[in-house]
Image: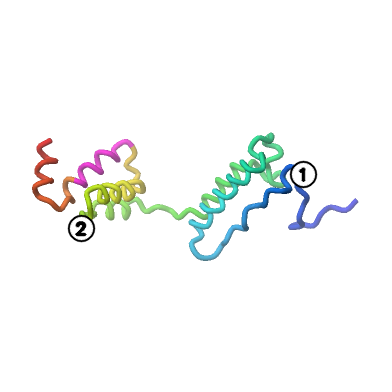
Amino acid sequence: MSQPEVGATTSRPAHFSNIPLPAKLELKGDVAANWEFFKEEWKDYEIASDLEKQPQAKRTADKLGSLAEIISALDGCFKPKVNVIYERFVFGTAFQEENETIDAYVSRLRTLASTCGYKELEGEMIRDRLVIGIGSYHTKKQLISN
């Protein structure tokens, strides 16, 4: 009996056969975004095919290790390294833009702060940046007095 060739397609169990596999991971363009999209597609596939309910042994890819380990390793390859100093610089210089609502400014600050590694101080840092960066002197004065 011959062994299947590397890269050859293998048959899937019958209960998986009606569920299409996720599209191949695109390694061109924004690879980090492509990787996030692929992971979401894979999670959806696992749920739809009931693969997530299978024992871990069935969820491994050619005994390379658990799927979680594989995904973690690929995360390390595709997720860009965060330059915390730069992210904090961008956050620290974020001022409310002309015609930007306070809600939109706070939302932007939350997004910027999420990559700064502030952890439990994140809320306080957003509050302080809001007070410093808000355009209205009257609103700034009210925030400081509270």
Q: Nearer the viewer, residue 49 or 116?
A: 49
Residue 70 left/right relative to 31: right
| Residue at which label 2 appears | 99
Picture residue at 77% right of the left edge, 57% below the top: 8
The magenta region covers: 120-130
Kindly identify the amino acid type of the residue bearing the numbered disc 2: Asn
Residue 118 left/right relative to 145: right
Picture residue at 33% right of the left edge, 49% below the top: 111
Which label was assigned to residue 76? none
Q: Is residue 117 above or below residue 89?
A: above
Q: Is residue 121 magenta?
A: yes
Residue 121 left/right relative to 82: left
Q: Earlier in the sequence, mark 2 or mark 1?
A: 1
**Residue 142 at x, y percent in the picture:** 10, 41
User: Can you say which quadrant of the picture contains the C terminus?
Assistant: top left
| Residue at which label 1 appears | 14
Query: Predominant secondary structure in magenta?
Result: helix
Work out which residue is located at the far right of the displayed protein and give it: 1
